[in-house]
Image: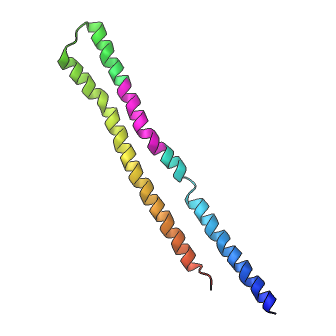
């Protein structure tokens, strides 16, 4: 009779662990994709800046002048994508941190509610 009770306890522990594992897998499923997109934000911003700078140099080559005022305006416009990429990346890092904390908190709550008796 003691053997049957022990098997039931082992079975319930396995079910508990399976439920916790499935929750963790489900909750963390899209975190790596979000992290990848966050890492791409500054690179996309930099690509916009490089494109803008190419346009500035193209205008300089066509007009044949190195007017500092016109260059400053173009450079100013070219740096906006970098700033946007950095804002996106910083916001994304903040979001990923909050998501990780929420997943950990929910997993802990689940473990506590399913606590082994």
Q: Is residue 87 left or right of residue 97?
A: left
The spot of residue 69 in percent (x, y) is 17, 19
Numbered disc total:
0
Quick check: 20 above or below 48? below
- Splitting the image into 4 quarters, where does residue 81 fall? top left
Q: Which residue is found at the position 59% from the left and 80% from the top?
A: 115
Whether the magenta-drawn stretch holds residue 29 is answered as: no
The spot of residue 51 in percent (x, y) is 38, 23
Give the residues in magenta.
37-50
Q: Which residue is found at the position 37% from the left and 49% from the top?
A: 91
Q: Is residue 90 left or right of residue 24?
A: left
Q: Is residue 64 left or right of residue 17?
A: left
Whether the magenta-drawn stretch holds residue 44 is answered as: yes
Q: Residue furthest bottom?
A: 1
Quick check: 18 above or below 59? below
- Splitting the image into 4 quarters, where does residue 44 fall? top left
Color scheme of the displayed model: rainbow
- Splitting the image into 4 quarters, where does residue 4 fall? bottom right
Quick check: 46 above or below 111? above
Q: Residue furthest left?
A: 69
The spot of residue 36 in percent (x, y) is 50, 44
Main SS, magenta residues: helix
The spot of residue 52 in percent (x, y) is 34, 24
Q: Which residue is found at the position 74% from the left and 78% from the top?
A: 11
- Quarter of the image with the N terminus is bottom right
- Quarter of the image with the C terminus is bottom right
Q: Which residue is found at the position 67% from the left and 69% from the top?
A: 18
């Amino acid at each position: 009779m003691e053997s049957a009770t022990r098997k039931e306890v082992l079975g319930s522990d396995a079910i508990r662990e399976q439920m916790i594992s499935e929750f963790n897998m489900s909750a963390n499923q899209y975190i790596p994709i979000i992290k990848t997109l966050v890492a791409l934000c500054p690179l996309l911003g930099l690509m916009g800046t490089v494109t803008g700078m190419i346009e500035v140099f193209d205008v300089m080559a066509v007009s044949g002048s190195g007017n500092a005022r016109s260059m400053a305006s173009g450079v100013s416009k070219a740096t906006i994508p970098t700033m946007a990429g950095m804002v996106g990346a910083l916001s994304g890092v903040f979001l990923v941190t909050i998501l990780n904390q929420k997943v950990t908190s929910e997993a802990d709550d689940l473990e506590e509610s399913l606590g082994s008796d």
